Amino acid sequence: MIVKTLLAAIVAGLIAGVFMTAAQEMRVVPLILHAEKYEGEAPSADHPATQEPVAGHDQHSWLNGTSALGALLSTFSPVTPAHAHEHEGEHEEGGIMFGMSRFSGTLLANLVTGAGFSLLLAGVSLVIGYPITLANGAFWGAFGWLAVHLLPAIGLPPELPGFPAAELGDRQVWWAATVLLSAVALYLLALRRELVAKIAGLALIAAPQIYGAPQPLDISSNVPAVLGAEFAVAALATTLAFWLVLGVVSGFINDRFVKAH
Amino acid sequence: MATSTVSSIPLSLNDRLVAGISALLIGAFLVFGAGLANSAVLHDTAHDTRHSYGFPCH
């Protein structure tokens, strides 16, 4: 029964992952591709304050390695890209696993991410003892989106390739902490009756935002701001659709298959 | 109605917690691997996904 419960969550996540892959192709992926044209233009010498553009360039060598610009940069660079990777230390040679196409890689990552978020949602539901049903699935999805996307996006909006950003590790820690605190806060706000719980919930939502997300020292970017604004909204809208599908499909599968043991 | 089933017949409270915590651990592992892990291969494979989901990325 435990295995069946977990399998139900994984199946719901895979379905939502396939949906997400299709939804991304509408707005989000075209904007990423558009932004990458500008990202390649960023000469690393212009950003001495941060290492991000350099790291970004190296990690994207599979993208712009074939472009004329990449060839030009490597001509003028004192080190070859292979050496640059060695200097990065932890960054081994990149590339998409199993030699898949870019689209297949994205599909695979969406399936894994979908299954992961679905298991997290199911795990929360099981631990706190509130089932996900077809009737309340959309609410589960909406709350997942609030905790994982909207509330962290207040500090760290979805960013395009080539956008300036603070140290990656710092941002990841802030992001993960904010997701966790926001999820606990939403539980307190939505499912507990006590006044103290409501107040604690609001405080937990506010805490990471007041503490503040790590911000870059240098906010100049070659990527046009309009693309960034469009992308932030498109990414949030797309993930909202993903979470609603995830919640409703999870509820449907629970009602239909897990209940009928 | 996973949990109401759960509480009525098939899953005891103990089983429910085991299932829930297993789901949380496996889910966190998958999300970490796709979204946050500092590996060039994972990053490049999941690149567009990481940006679309708003994961902090390079």
Image (cartoon, rainbow, N blue to C red):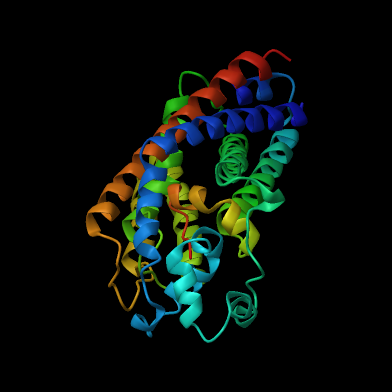
From the viewer's perspective, is A218 left or right of A147? left
| Residue drawn where x is 62% and y is 26% of the image | B3
Q: Is residue A31 above or below residue A61?
A: above
Q: Is residue A33 above or below residue A20?
A: below
Task: Determine which quarter of the picture holds residue A101.
Answer: top right
Q: Nearer the viewer, residue A28 or B20?
A: A28
Residue B20 point in image, percent of width and height: 66, 39
Residue A21 point in image, percent of width and height: 50, 36
Q: Residue furthest left?
A: A226
From the viewer's perspective, is A88 left or right of A161? right
From the viewer's perspective, is A256 left or right of B54? right
Q: Is residue A65 above or below residue A25?
A: below
Q: Is residue A196 visible?
A: no
| Residue drawn where x is 36% and y is 71% of the image | A42
Residue A7 point in image, percent of width and height: 71, 29
Task: Determine which quarter of the picture holds residue A255.
Answer: top right
| Residue drawn where x is 22% and y is 54% of the image | A226
Number of labelled discs? 0
Quarter of the figure that contains the C terminus of chain A: top right
